[in-house]
Amino acid sequence: MSCIAVLGAGAVGARVARRLLASDAVDRIVLRDVEPDRLAGASRALGSRVVVEHAPFPGRLEADLVVVATPRGTQVEATAASIEAGRPAVLVGDGLAETVAVLRLAGDAERAGVPVAVGSGFGPGLSCVLAVHAAAWFDEVDEVHVAKAGTGGPACALVHHRALSRRSYDWRGGDDGGTWVRRPGGSGRELFWFPDPVGPRDCYRAALPDPVLLHHALPEVERITARMAATRRDRLTAPLPMLSPPHTEGGTGAIRVEVRGRRGDASDVAVLGATERPAVAAATVAAIAVEWILSGRHRVCGMAGLGEMVEPVDFLHDLAGRGLEAQVFEGERALS
């Protein structure tokens, strides 16, 4: 039985703690946050097996594994503290700049010999697992395109608001080894169909971390992009401070992953997706990632995105058992 430290008591962190309470592998959870109101709300719903700490995120960590579900600007320090303490970590951040900064700690994680699963939420997270899973269906993969709709709690809403005003990172391969192409956020409109009930949405370039993680997982792929659903108002207000406080939690969201390549002599396309409230989905993905690392089922002893850290088929099966079921994009046939 293990003790898990969950850093961040927001929409995702509190749910991760709740899901881990139901795990046979976990007997104690330490929930830490710097905001007493968030802690109070979470502790009322979690019971006596959760120890609540009103303390800085990267403080002393007395736990077997650390879940980093902290706000923007705090994840690098929290991850570094976890690695220094020799504790495995599961991260659910979705900011591009912060993900890139966390990945600079990869050498430290490898030297410490601890698994650190980066991008272990809905997107990135499940998006990367679906991409790696679909890539295995092809003899050769040329392109991977990720799209997402919806936001979780206030911290997630703020990250997505800023992402539309920041430059995107798209990967373009080539004979020279390839390069990252940076394009303005809010440009490049494409209409994508997400699984019901989300349906069609206009999606735009944004500062999303999925291509960075997927390029590492699928280095031979020639083109990797990511877009997010947005309205005209979202795009116009993205360069400005948020005009109203972020919502407590958004409604139903979705991810969509399109993989293009060759099977034999023929070109083919696979489209996979999933729908759920983003905070609920992120917590489910992160909780199962914790269980995988505790049981030694992870594939990397060091830092990696979730698509590299887990075996996709079994991980998707575990997600389906918790109610988060991915779909092949005919909309009816579940993944198995």
Image (cartoon, rainbow, N blue to C red):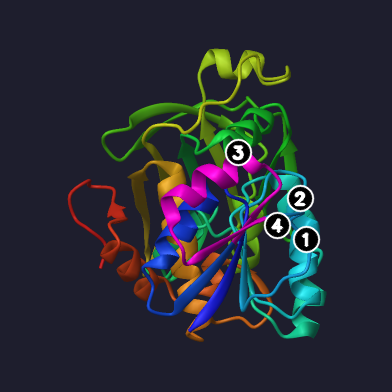
**Label 2 belongs to which residue?**
74
Going by the numbered disc 1, the residue's amino acid type is Pro
**Label 4 belongs to which residue?**
174
Going by the numbered disc 2, the residue's amino acid type is Thr
**Cα distance, mark 4 to mark 1?**
41 Å
- Report the number of numbered marks: 4
Which residue: 46% across, 63% down? 48
Give residue 234's position: percent from left, percent from top: 57, 19
Which residue: 74% across, 39% down? 182
Q: Which callout, 2 or 4, points at the residue further toward the start of the chain?
A: 2
**Cα distance, mark 3 to mark 4?**
51 Å
The image quarter in which residue 163 lies: top right
Going by the numbered disc 4, the residue's amino acid type is Gly
Q: Which mark is residue 37?
A: 3
Which residue: 44% across, 43% down? 278
**Label 1 belongs to which residue?**
58
Viewer-nearest of discs 1 and 3: 3
**Cα distance, mark 2 to mark 3?**
19 Å
Q: Which residues are magenta?
A: 31-53
Name the side, left or right, on which 151 lies relative to 245: left
The crowding category of the residue bearing disc 3, from other C-alpha atoms within 10 Å (few below 14, some 14 to 19, many at least 20), is few
Residue 10 visible within the image: no
Tell me the quadrant of the picture where the C terminus can be found.
bottom left
